Image (spheres, grey):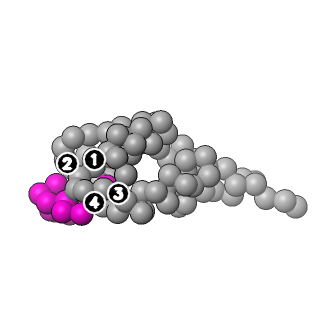
């Protein structure tokens, strides 16, 4: 019996904040988030899902860590974007 994997809609409603110096233009990262259904926020709060942190991230990184927000490097964010159908690798479930 062949098994099929179905991704959950990982990006829908997830909030991201971007900080620090990145290798790609910020607008490109914003477009990648919004194009997949995510939200881009300017501030770090306890309701934020992910902080994308580049070099010299500063106070936003410190605040995210203090609040327990998941911090992604630019490379980790790129890997997340590369997942099938925009799903996070951990968001796959085996269909019956």
Residue holding disc 4: 54
As drawn, 28 above or below 72:
above
Quadrant position of the C terminus in the picture: bottom right
Whether the residues at callouts 2 and 4 have beta carbons within 8 Å, the answer is no
Please tell me whether residue 59 belongs to the stretch shown in magenta. yes
Residue under label 1: 17
Of circles 3 and 4, which is in front?
A: 3
Nearest the eye: 54 or 13: 54
Q: Magenta residues, as a range? A: 52-67
Depth check, front residue: 25 or 15: 25
- Disc 2 vs disc 1: which is toward the camera? 1
Q: Is residue 39 magenta?
A: no
Left or right, 14 with respect to 92, comes to: left
Image disc number at residue 44: 2
Left or right of 79? Residue 55 is left
Q: Earlier in the sequence, mark 2 or mark 3?
A: 3
């Amino acid at each position: 019996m062949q098994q099929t994997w179905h991704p959950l809609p990982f990006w829908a409603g997830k909030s991201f904040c971007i900080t620090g110096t990145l290798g790609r233009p910020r607008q490109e990262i914003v477009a990648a988030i919004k194009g997949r259904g995510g939200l881009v926020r300017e501030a770090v709060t306890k309701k934020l899902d992910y902080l994308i942190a580049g070099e010299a991230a500063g106070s936003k990184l410190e605040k995210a860590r203090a609040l327990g927000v998941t911090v992604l490097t630019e490379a980790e964010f790129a890997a997340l974007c590369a997942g099938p159908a925009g799903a996070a690798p951990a968001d796959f479930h085996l269909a019956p």
